[in-house]
């Protein structure tokens, strides 16, 4: 039995350096996840600020040009959120690569970063908006009363508190994003999941390569989850 196990491990991982499919796939997965969460944070914060600004000011100055522009921007953001949160991420990936970039010779990894990043932005936006709206409205009024503009009040008073409140949730979003990248193989990207599947196709043994890929995902998620737990504990300690 031990000899059979040894032979299986050799066949799946050592022979022809097949373990490199997992190594290279893991690097690709992390690269896509990191860049996608960066895209998600940028667009998510923009959308969250627009939506929260609309919610805070929708009862004031309805007929001004700025109010109408804000209302239009909010409607566009709502449509964006409805579409991105209401459709599967794998479908969005296929549409971006095979439809939007159909006539452009674009790198597959770039297409995946766009797909996962725009999808993540929809969830980041609602997380951040929830954090902004959780801050007492009196703090916004206090900032305005001491002469700050709305933008400065948001930048110096509201956003720092909101970001502190939502950082753990943003960490969890990153964990979810890493697992979502497992569908990148639909456009032939050799990520971690695809790497395991390539080994399976070479050895006709599904158990070892797929379990190995799953264990790598699990290890990454456990490490990140532990980091988020420690970070949350330090945040709570700093509030005392």
Image (cartoon, rainbow, N blue to C red):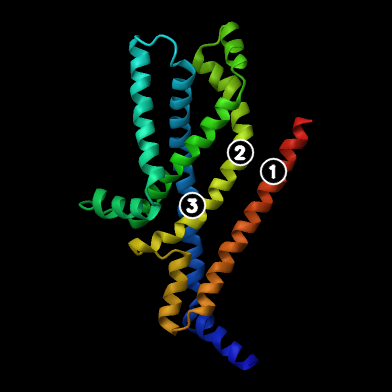
Q: Does 9 sit above or below residue 145? A: below
- Marks 3 and 2 in Cβ contact (< 8 Å): no
Query: Which element carries disc 1, helix, strand or loop?
Result: helix
Q: Which residue is mark 1?
A: 231
User: Mark 3 = which residue?
Assistant: 33
Say few, some or many: other residues with alpha carbon within 10 Å of mark 3 (under 14 / 14 to 19 / 20 or more). many
Element class at badge 3 = helix
The Cα–Cα distance between marks 3 and 2, rounded to whole angstroms, is 17 Å
Q: Which residue is mark 2?
A: 167
Which residue reaches farthest right? 240
Secondary structure, mark 2, is helix
Q: Earlier in the sequence, mark 3 or mark 2?
A: 3
Pointer 2 with pointer 1, Cβ within 8 A: yes
Q: Residue at x 34, y 19 (%)?
A: 69
Q: Nearer the viewer, residue 60 or 217?
A: 60
Q: Is residue 182 above or below residue 149?
A: below
């Amino acid at each position: 039995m031990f000899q059979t196990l040894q032979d299986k491990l050799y066949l799946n991982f050592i022979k022809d350096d097949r373990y490199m499919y997992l190594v290279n796939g893991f690097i690709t997965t992390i690269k896509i996840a990191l860049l996608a969460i960066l895209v998600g944070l940028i667009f998510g914060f923009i959308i969250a600020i627009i939506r929260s600004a609309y919610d805070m000011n929708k009862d004031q100055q309805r007929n001004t040009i700025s109010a109408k522009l804000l209302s239009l921007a909010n409607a566009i953001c709502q449509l964006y959120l409805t579409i991105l949160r209401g459709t599967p991420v794998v479908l969005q990936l296929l549409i971006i690569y095979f439809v939007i970039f159909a006539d452009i010779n674009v790198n597959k990894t770039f297409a995946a970063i766009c797909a996962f990043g725009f999808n993540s932005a929809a969830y980041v936006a609602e997380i951040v908006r929830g954090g902004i709206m959780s801050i007492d409205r009196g703090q916004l009024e206090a900032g305005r009363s001491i002469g700050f503009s709305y933008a400065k009040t948001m930048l110096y008073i509201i956003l720092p508190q909101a970001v502190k409140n939502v950082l753990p949730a943003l960490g969890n979003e990153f964990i979810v994003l890493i697992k979502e990248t497992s569908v990148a193989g639909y456009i032939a990207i050799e990520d971690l999941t695809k790497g395991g599947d390539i080994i399976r196709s070479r050895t006709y043994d599904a158990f070892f390569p797929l379990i190995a890929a799953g264990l790598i995902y699990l290890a990454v998620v456990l490490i990140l989850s532990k980091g988020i737990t420690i970070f949350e504990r330090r945040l709570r300690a700093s509030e005392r």
